[in-house]
Amino acid sequence: MTDSAPAIAVHNLRKLYGDKAAVDGVDLAVPRGCFFGFLGPNGAGKSTTIRMLTGLIPPSSGSIELLGMPLAERELEIKRRIGLVPDESLLFDRLTGAEFLEFVGRMYGLARPMAVERAQSLLELFELREKRKLIAEYSKGMRKRLAMAASLIHHPDLFLMDEPFEGVDAVGARLMKDILLDQVRRGATIFLTSHVLEVVERLCDRVAIIDHGKIVREGSMDELRGGTESLEDVFVRVVGAGHEFHELEWLK
Amino acid sequence: MIPAILRAQWLSMRISRLASGRRGAVFTGIVAVIWYGFWTLLAVVAEELTAAPELRSHIETWLPVGLLAVFGYWQLAPLASATMGASLDLRKLLIYPVPRRSLFLVEILLRVTTCAELLLLLTGAAIGLLRNPAFGAWRSIGRVPLAVVLFAAFNLMLAAGLRNLIERLLSRRGIREVMALLLMLVGVLPRLLIVTGVGGRRIEHAFPAAANPIWPWGAAARCMLGLAAGARPLPAAAVLAAWTLAAYLFGRWQFVRSLRYDFQEAQATVVSAKDRPWTDGLYRLPSFVLPDPLAAIVEKELRSLVRTPRFRLVFVMGFSFGLVVWLPMMLRGRVTHSAVSGNFLAVVSLYALFLLAQVTYGNAFGFDRSAAQLYYAAPVALSRVLAGKNIAAAIFIFLEVAAVSAACSVLRLGISAGQIGEAFLVTAIAALYLLGVGNVSSVNYPRPMRAQRVSAGGAAGRAQGLLFLLYPIALLPVFLAYLARYAFDNRIIFYAILAFAAALGVAIYWMAMESAVATAGKRRETILAELSRGEGPMVAE
């Protein structure tokens, strides 16, 4: 394990579902302390890649190294240093926000008093003040904020986030962005997927675009935009979105 | 529109079937063959009995009682098992312009999911009557099928109405457990009264009254038996048709009320720890004796399950239904000194252990749904997760035994401290085997469960099937211990066998845990996909 090794080093990563490759030979190197945007149209393989990085699904082939350690061999050690915000809910509906955060903290090895203390601080920070409300009654935005809080509680070095801003109001999104930027400043690495390209453009240092399971562009934000284009222009051009709806006569 | 709904459901279920693979399909097939094979056998017996001309007087006496039993099973069995079969998920269908009558028709057809075995039985009895010359044999080809169809339709529509009514009642926070208890008491009260001798004669006289053609089962019996039995079939058929119409109106009325009912509003809960600070202390008790993350998992399970309506319902049923079902046998056994009366507490505790399987150890990740991925994402070994869930389940199992013991004391059933200790002991030993099986089924047949849905979504059918098949085997060591005690009248032999059973149980639990953890690692993708999957337009059991 070396601190100079990339936070994420993926080589020839593939995930097959039958004959179909959801992820098809992806190579990625995300430097430490980087805010990395992972973009792609729906079904391109973003979530599958993140799920492989977190160990939720095994790759069909290829290698994954996180924080300089091979995921397959040092899974538990790596997991202790990862903060995860997945696309699907990992919240237990029948707990309150405070109970859930305390539970997550203890699962990541924090002593109970510390987990309780951090849980309270995070609930305050994320304005989830109805401390006794069950998660089942949370709105979508509140659930995302709680998931973000849970990813922070053990102070991880690497964040893997799948659409973290989805359903979050403007105030909550601003808070989350500020926190994430602060995490990058202290040296953490963030690997994030989002469909909100303006957010990615504003936050990320580097971006990769995946389409049909393959990386089709990768580079710094400036390299991708080439000085004149917006990220949205680049994205639409690269993934080739069509506008065939004009051909549907009945829709006119 | 109905074909579209059915197709959507079929496609939704197909995803699940594909995920479970050929092994799952084979197992489902085996369970189905055993279950329906048993009922087919009963149907054949019914056919043979009703086809015998020499049994004419017996058939005339017992057919209405038999149909009353069919009616009782049809309406009460879904309650007793806390599984009410498939039903339409109205939340997903209300947005579409589907006529109510179409939805109601599908809802009625879905009631077949809880009573297909009874249709087999009725068919067997009907074929027997059609062969029986004492009742006109094939000359009754018109009235026997008519009576069976009307009786089945009556039951289906009544079941649809009752299901909607009960589901609305059970959805109300605070009263669902009381409702469940009352419904069960209503179901077993007649039997209890007969056995205890309270109004016994009057109740016993009520059985012949079942033959009265004013009741649907009496009318159906008369209609099936026909003129040859001395009855007039036409008025009986008219009475049966009237009952069927009434059941249709009731079912339709309840269905429409459910369409307008806001389940979410009824289930709205805001937990206030300030109101009950002592419960928070109870949840934290495991942390005093267990290390993290085990304690954290146990604590989380305790909090979550207590707040889960479906779990609470099954928990209440675990001791109350066990009590009211076995109590008559126990009371009868006071006279005859049967095995049940002597070991009543142990019997009820083992029944509660079995019932809890569907909401705890039989499908350990069911209520977690997609959140189960946290167990894979967190730096915790899966053996710890399963062990934590098992400990939480064991706590509830022992609470059940304590509740049963307390109820026995209140009812002054003469249960000694020794018997209470023995009930705890044998339940703990049997739990070792069943928790082991439950861990294996939880990772092989995971299925998402809805916490707030009290009437559907228990453990996967295959998981329940596996437990159902293995339950007698799991109880075998304990059963052998009791057998030895009665055979040799020696408590030392009894406890020696229990000690052996406990040692074997520990070994089996350990092996099952190893197997479950290995499977959970290999099948993680399938498990998470299965637990995260959405449902089709129906809530399937």
Image: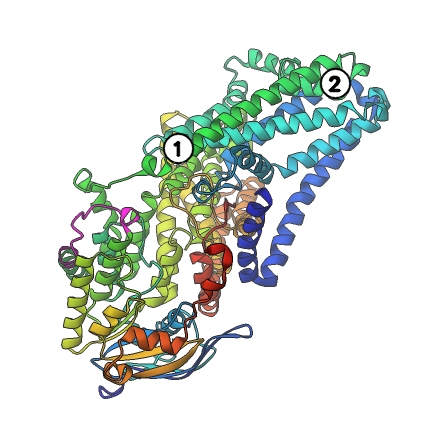
Q: Residues within 10 Å of mark 2 (few under 14, many from 20)?
A: some
Q: Nearer the viewer, residue B481 or B97?
A: B97
Q: Nearer the viewer, residue B86 or A109?
A: B86
What is the span of residues highlighted in magenta in the rendered image? A122-139
The kind of secondary structure element at disc 1 is loop
Q: Which residue is identified by label 1?
A: B261
- Queried whether the magenta region covers residue B410, the answer comes back as no
- Which residue sits at x=42%, y=31%? B180
Image coordinates of residue A145 in percent, x first then y, are 23, 58
Q: CA distance from mark 1 to mark 2?
A: 45 Å
- For disc 2, the chain is B
User: Going by the image, does B350 lie left or right of B412?
Assistant: right
Q: Residues within 10 Å of mark 1 (few under 14, many from 20)?
A: few
Figure quadrant of residue B383: bottom left
- For disc 1, the chain is B
The kind of secondary structure element at disc 2 is helix
Q: Which residue is identified by label 2?
A: B60
Instruction: Please state which amino acid type lies under the numbered disc 2.
Output: Glu
Figure quadrant of residue B451: top left
